[in-house]
């Protein structure tokens, strides 16, 4: 057991020899790919490394054999177990695709899994899904929720339509975590209360720069796009920017990592503009994604709506330059010395100009690579992010023990000797 958790167990009487028993409840877990799935996986892995016992509670998406194999691998390699409490289905929501577990008996199964947990941590809390159900039925000493979504005021109908039940659910939370100040900006007009801002993280071992002896493949500079193909991610603007770069005589190869409802229209646009031969459609990729980042010359992110910028920190950890739309979520990352080039949203000409500037300046990219990697490790490596979440658990656990049980110590730093 790690000292961080051993001290907690001794001083506040945690009822397990492995630290706190944490139920991480989510609608998004592998094999579903996306930002929340990555968040749940890496946070769970790092909490286990800190000595906690983590169970990811989710629905089943994909074949039983595939899911069973994934769950076995994560238990063996990453230390957390996964319990599937029903079938998870995709549904349209807020301009994207949400997931809901709707199987008969899923709530009863959820209640059984949560029984005896020390912490119930719900990931994503708006809608008729497992996380809000878990909050409402939690009897754990500590119940925590993380919010991942930013919505501009007036855009998310559920905040208005279900305001009262959402408020009741929020009142059951001991702590509310958001991944960025942008999330607070979207939530605060609708719901009062305090929010802990703990960002998304990145695995800085998995996402790394090119090593000594490695080189980018021969050919023109590669611009990488990583996102679901849906309207808010604006791949069409990037395709138009590639056409503009071609017209200016600049060779560039666009790699598109992702899939979604706009793919057919995006491919038609590429053919219409005569740049289809300059685009490589990678589809949904996971294991190969880190290599694509570190071999790219730049990441282009023309997205118009984001709560944070996971793809930005993945690129920065990989030593890859970032050219991105100037939205509130991306401004949570590209600030306080973090390098990157902002361009106006929905402006292919400005996007082309920003890419041309970065692609033409090798010295700039080299300096950005060094600075971006160092700051990303300092601010967003999952080991540090997970420790902050673990401290939230500890603070709430401590708040529920008597002063005598914690020998007068009242902060994680005092208890853990940091």
Image (cartoon, rainbow, N blue to C red):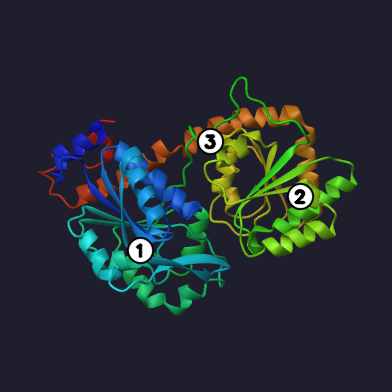
Element marked by disc 1 = helix
Instruction: Determine which residue is flagged by label 3.
Output: 207
Q: CA distance from mark 3 to mark 2?
A: 25 Å
Residue 18 falls left or right of residue 191: left
Q: CA distance from mark 1 to mark 2?
A: 38 Å
Q: Residue at x 78, y 46 (%)?
A: 278
- The quarter in which the C terminus is drawn is top left
Element marked by disc 2 = helix
User: Counting residues from the N terminus, which is met first, the one under dot 3 or under dot 2?
Assistant: 3
Tell me the crowding category of disc 1: few under 14, some 14 to 19, or many 20 or more residues within 10 angstroms, Cα based.
many
Tell me the crowding category of disc 2: few under 14, some 14 to 19, or many 20 or more residues within 10 angstroms, Cα based.
many
Residue 163 shows which numbered tag?
none
User: Counting residues from the N terminus, which is met first, the one under dot 3 or under dot 1?
Assistant: 1
Residue 180 visible at all = no
Residue 351 shows which numbered tag?
2
Instruction: Determine which residue is flagged by label 1.
Output: 131
Of 30 and 346, nearer the camera is 30
Residue 254 falls left or right of residue 208: right
Q: Position of residue 321 (x, y in %)?
A: 67, 37
């Amino acid at each position: 057991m790690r000292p961080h958790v051993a001290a907690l167990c001794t001083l506040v009487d945690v009822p397990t020899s492995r630290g706190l028993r944490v139920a991480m409840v989510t609608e998004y877990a592998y094999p579903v790919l996306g930002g929340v799935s990555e968040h749940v996986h890496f946070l769970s892995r790092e909490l286990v490394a800190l000595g906690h016992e983590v169970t990811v509670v989710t629905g089943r998406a994909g074949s039983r054999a595939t899911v069973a194999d994934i769950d076995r691998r994560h238990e063996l390699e990453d230390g957390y177990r996964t319990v599937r409490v029903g079938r998870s289905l995709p549904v349209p929501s807020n301009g994207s695709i949400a997931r809901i577990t709707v199987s008969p008996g899923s709530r009863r199964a959820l209640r059984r899994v949560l029984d005896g947990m020390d912490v119930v941590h719900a990931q994503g809390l708006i809608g008729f899904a497992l996380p809000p159900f878990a909050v409402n039925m939690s009897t754990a000493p500590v119940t925590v929720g993380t919010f991942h979504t930013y919505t501009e005021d007036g855009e998310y109908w559920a905040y208005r339509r279900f305001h009262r039940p959402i408020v009741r659910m929020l009142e059951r939370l001991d702590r509310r975590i958001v991944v960025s100040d942008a999330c607070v900006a979207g939530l605060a007009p609708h719901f009062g209360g305090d929010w802990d801002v703990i960002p998304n993280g990145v695995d800085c071992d998995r996402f790394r720069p090119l090593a000594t002896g490695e080189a980018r493949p021969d050919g023109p500079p590669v611009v990488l796009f990583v996102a679901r193909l849906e309207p808010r991610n604006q791949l069409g603007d990037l395709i138009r920017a590639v056409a503009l770069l071609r017209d200016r005589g600049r060779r560039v190869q666009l790699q598109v990592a992702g899939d979604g409802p706009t793919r057919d229209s995006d491919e038609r646009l590429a053919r219409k503009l005569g740049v289809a031969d300059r685009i490589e459609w990678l589809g949904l990729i996971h294991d190969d994604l880190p290599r694509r980042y570190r071999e790219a010359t730049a990441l282009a992110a023309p997205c118009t709506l984001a709560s944070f910028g996971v793809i930005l920190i993945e690129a920065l950890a990989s030593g890859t330059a970032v050219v991105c739309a100037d939205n509130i979520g991306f401004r949570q990352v590209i600030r306080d010395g973090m390098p990157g080039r902002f361009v106006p949203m929905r402006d292919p000409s400005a996007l082309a100009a920003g890419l041309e500037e970065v692609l033409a300046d090798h010295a700039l990219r080299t300096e950005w690579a060094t600075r971006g990697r160092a700051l990303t490790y300092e601010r967003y490596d999952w080991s540090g992010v997970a420790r902050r979440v673990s401290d939230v658990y500890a603070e709430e656990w401590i708040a529920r023990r008597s002063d005598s049980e914690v020998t007068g110590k009242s902060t994680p730093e005092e208890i853990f000797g940091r």
